[in-house]
Image (cartoon, helix red, strand yellow):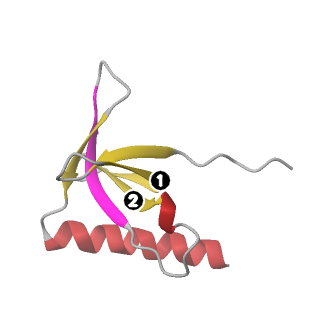
């Protein structure tokens, strides 16, 4: 059985340096119409504890690019954390 290739994206930091991330999951919230993405740095992927980054995103209609926006409200963070916990529990079952 072939291993499924994980989707990867490049995200520049505040200094303009590009970093490669592996996409854990994306999800949409129907009530708000917002979309979210959770990623981990590829270089940390094999560590026992990895830092997960989450962003609100918008697809660019004419391109393959995403516009990423920082999550700024506690409500958004709680929603993303709940989704991450749900997905983590499903993987361990």
Between discs 1 and 2, the one toward the N terminus: 1
Q: Position of residue 42 (x, y in %)?
A: 50, 58
Give the left or right position of residue 53, taking residue 16 as reference: right
Give the left or right position of residue 8, taking residue 63 as reference: right
Q: Is residue 59 above or below residue 51?
A: above
Q: Position of residue 65 (x, y in %)?
A: 33, 31
Q: Residues within 10 Å of mark 1 (few under 14, many from 20)?
A: some
The answer to whether any part of residue 48 appears in the image is: yes
Can you identify the residue that label 1 sits on? 23
The residue at 44%/53% (across/down) is 21
The reply to whether discs 1 and 2 touch (Cβ–Cβ < 8 Å) is: yes
Can you identify the residue that label 2 sits on? 38
User: Taken as a whole, is the magenta stretch helix, strand or loop?
Assistant: strand
Q: Is residue 59 above or below residue 5?
A: above
Quarter of the rendering containing residue 72:
bottom left
Magenta segment: does it hold 54? yes
Residue occupying the far right of the picture: 1
Secondary element at tag 1: strand
Region in magenta:
53-60
Residue occupying the far top of the picture: 62
The answer to whether any part of residue 32 appears in the image is: no
Q: Position of residue 34 (x, y in %)?
A: 25, 48
Quarter of the image where the C terminus is located: bottom right
Secondary element at tag 2: strand
Give the left or right position of residue 53, taking residue 72 as reference: right
């Amino acid at each position: 059985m072939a291993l499924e290739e994980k989707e990867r994206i490049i995200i520049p930091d505040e200094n303009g340096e590009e970093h490669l991330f592996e996409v854990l999951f994306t999800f949409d919230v129907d009530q708000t119409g917002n979309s979210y993405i959770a990623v981990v740095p590829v270089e940390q992927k094999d560590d026992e504890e990895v830092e997960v980054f989450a962003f609100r995103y918008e697809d660019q209609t004419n391109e393959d690019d995403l516009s990423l926006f920082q999550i700024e409200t506690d409500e958004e963070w709680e929603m993303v954390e709940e989704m991450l916990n749900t997905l983590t529990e499903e993987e361990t079952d």
